[in-house]
Image (cartoon, rainbow, N blue to C red):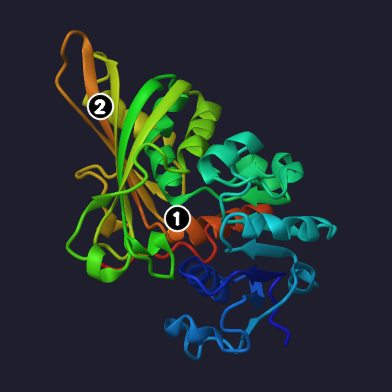
Amino acid sequence: MATGKRYRAAVIGGSGYGGAELVRRLLIHPDVELCRVASVDFVGEPLSAAHPSLEGATELRFEELSPAEAARGMDVVLLGLPHTVAAAKVPELAAIPGLRVVDMSGDFRLKDAAAYERWYKHTHPCPERLADFVYGLPELSREAIRRSRFVASPGCFATTIELALLPLARAGLLGGVVHVQGITGSSGAGVVPAAGTHHPVRAGNLRTYKPLEHQHVPEVVEALAQAGARDLALRFVPISAPLGRGILVTAFVELPEAWTQERLDALYRETFAGEPFVRVPRKRLPEVAAVSGSNFAEVGVAVGAALAGRRTVTAFGALDNLIKGGAGQAIQNMNLMLALDERASLADPGPWPP
């Protein structure tokens, strides 16, 4: 059925929470037609079988397809698969001339296969393709994303930390040990409940997991080094919270006394001036409720009193882990790769109250 849209897209791995956001945003996209959704779950069933909010929104059904079958006639394929599973699909997709691929897993975010093995506890399934992928943080690598056929969208924690610290990295102020705490909602754990993530143990509870060993650490270090950080050592502690969605990070940085609140506020506003999806609130600090349900992120800083010529600066970041931290950013990257309006299908603000 002709739609008049300029491009055709398929999603591989569309039954999870990230897949739900990919599908929802693609269905309302003005320039891209969602043509196929491949999955090993719900095969033959309508998309609403996994995503009730899509009841009546589309006639598409989940299909069990090879990568080549899913990509046939497509301009772009978006991968919503777990790590190692995504990498196994890439060789077949890469062999299709002109096809663009956006991967939401962690398989191609790192340039070093040995680092991948250390942090993800697996031998990389497709190391020969690592160099082909551009790291998909638009605020850092917009022009490279535009030129690329293959983009690795960043992780949710990684995006939040990188945006919170990007102004300091670009100003040459970021280096050495930086301590970060990140609080995340339960949707980041995926659609399948586990002993430590399902509602009875998550509601009314705060607990840490993977302290100092979270797999997003090396991609943050790589990205911020690209932005200008020097000898960065990230000490990151993630915390699970009784939220459905959303991330709030707090990073602690020591800066010279000359970096006052006013000066840092100006630096953050200048860094993100013109960025379509990063806000620097003027009268409050970032919060999850302000960005939940949207592709917007918020960043900000709070500056402590000077002591012995130094100040402790706390940098904050907040976003929706499923949208700017996941599927929304993947679509933002797709828009750039297809030379479309970067904001297409993503410009809506989140609901209030959330």
Residue 223 placement, left or right of 318:
right
Q: Secondary structure beneath disc 1?
A: helix
Tell me what residue is drawn at x 25 percent, y 57 percent.
Answer: 241
Q: Quadrant of the C terminus?
A: bottom left
The residue under label 1 is 324
Vertical order, 34 against 318 (above or below):
below
Tell me what residue is drawn at x 37 percent, y 58 percent.
Answer: 320
Q: Quadrant of the N terminus?
A: bottom right
Is 14 in front, or is 263? 14
- x and y percent of residue 278 in the render? 40, 47
Residue 288 placement, left or right of 23:
left
Vertical order, 152 against 228 (above or below):
below
Q: Is residue 338 visible?
A: no
Q: Residues within 10 Å of mark 2 (few under 14, many from 20)?
A: many
* Outermost residue toward the top in this view: 308
Number of marks in the image?
Answer: 2
- x and y percent of residue 41 in the render? 57, 79
Question: Alpha-carbon distance for marks 1 and 2?
Answer: 25 Å
Tell me what residue is drawn at x 16 percent, y 16 percent.
Answer: 306
Mark 1 and mark 2 in contact? Answer it, CB < 8 Å: no
Residue 72 placement, left or right of 340:
right
Q: Is residue 69 visible?
A: yes
Q: Looking at the image, is mark 1 or mark 2 earlier in the sequence?
A: 2
Query: What is the three-letter code of the residue carrying label 1?
Result: Lys
- x and y percent of residue 74 in the render? 76, 69
Q: Which mark is residue 313?
A: 2
Query: What is the three-letter code of the residue carrying label 2?
Result: Val
